[in-house]
Amino acid sequence: MGRNLLLAAAAALAVCVTGSALTLAQNSPQPGGASLRPAASFASIANQRDRSVALFNEMGKVLQSPRCMNCHPATERPRQGDIRKLHEPLVVRGKDGHGAPGLQCSTCHGKENYDPARIPGDGHWALAPASMAWEGKSLAQICEQLKDQNRNGSRDLTALVKHVTTDTLVLWGWNPGKGRTPAPGTAAEFGALMQAWADSGSACPAS
């Protein structure tokens, strides 16, 4: 029994190390993330709907960045790195977004980034629910999906703002570890944009 456990642990370690080596080879360090316009800079747009759409378009810089899109894939496989390649080694979403039995996310991903091997981490590393897949969708579609409580985890706008400003996995996007470009702007700026968008009617861009 003890020997089997050791073999299983060794196999899991080999999977993590191999995947890390592939990431190192294919995803070189990137410069800092792009900037975000502050929410207050949209106040001059008199028409409330136009202002709301403009705010969401600015939020889209984050929502469509690799830091978000990699964990909101259209398939059962996550993507990784700034180049958004399919995750290596091969892993799948699994029943609850934490991977398949025997190769769950926590096999390689710890509670925080492990920069020596460039393995990202968070206390609840996981894929977004399949109902929140954003890959391949327009910003208008992402906006409608984000507001749909049947798909977003039953969150109203207040809960959405709380989610993006307090969830540690969301906040990881601005602290992704060595070799990955952070999400644009700062977490605080993004939270302020979302709050201003909610306050202005949460309008979505045209399809």
Image: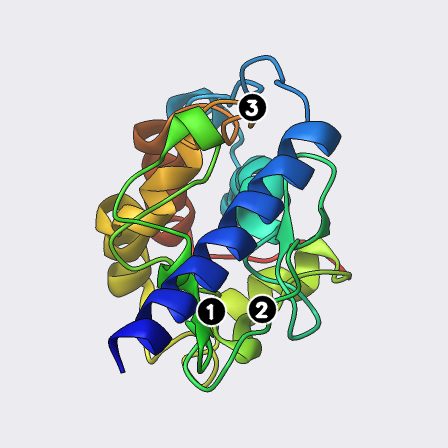
Q: In which quarter of the image is residue 38?
A: top left
- Let me know if residue 65 appears in the view: no
Judge from the rendering whether residue 59 lies leftward or rightward of residue 88; answer left or right. Answer: left
Q: Up-down: is 25 above or below 140?
A: above
| Label located before the other in sequence (3 or 1) | 1
Classify 10 Å Cα crowding around label 2: few (below 14), some (14-19), many (20 and above).
some
**Three-letter amino acid code at disc 1?**
Lys
What numbered label is drawn on residue 147?
A: 1
What numbered label is drawn on residue 179?
A: 3
**Three-letter amino acid code at disc 3?**
Gly
**Three-letter amino acid code at disc 2?**
Glu
In this view, the residue in front, 129 or 58, is 129
Q: Is there CB contact under 8 Å for labels 2 and 1?
A: yes
Q: Where is residue 198 in the image (x, y as percent from the top left)?
A: 37, 53
Task: Tell me the SS state at disc 2.
Answer: helix
Residue at 55% in and 79% down: 131
Q: Quadrant of the N terminus?
A: bottom left
- The Cα atoms of the two marked residues, 3 and 1, are separated by 32 Å
Q: Is there CB contact under 8 Å for labels 3 and 1?
A: no
Residue at 61% in and 46% down: 18
Circle 2 is placed at which residue position? 144
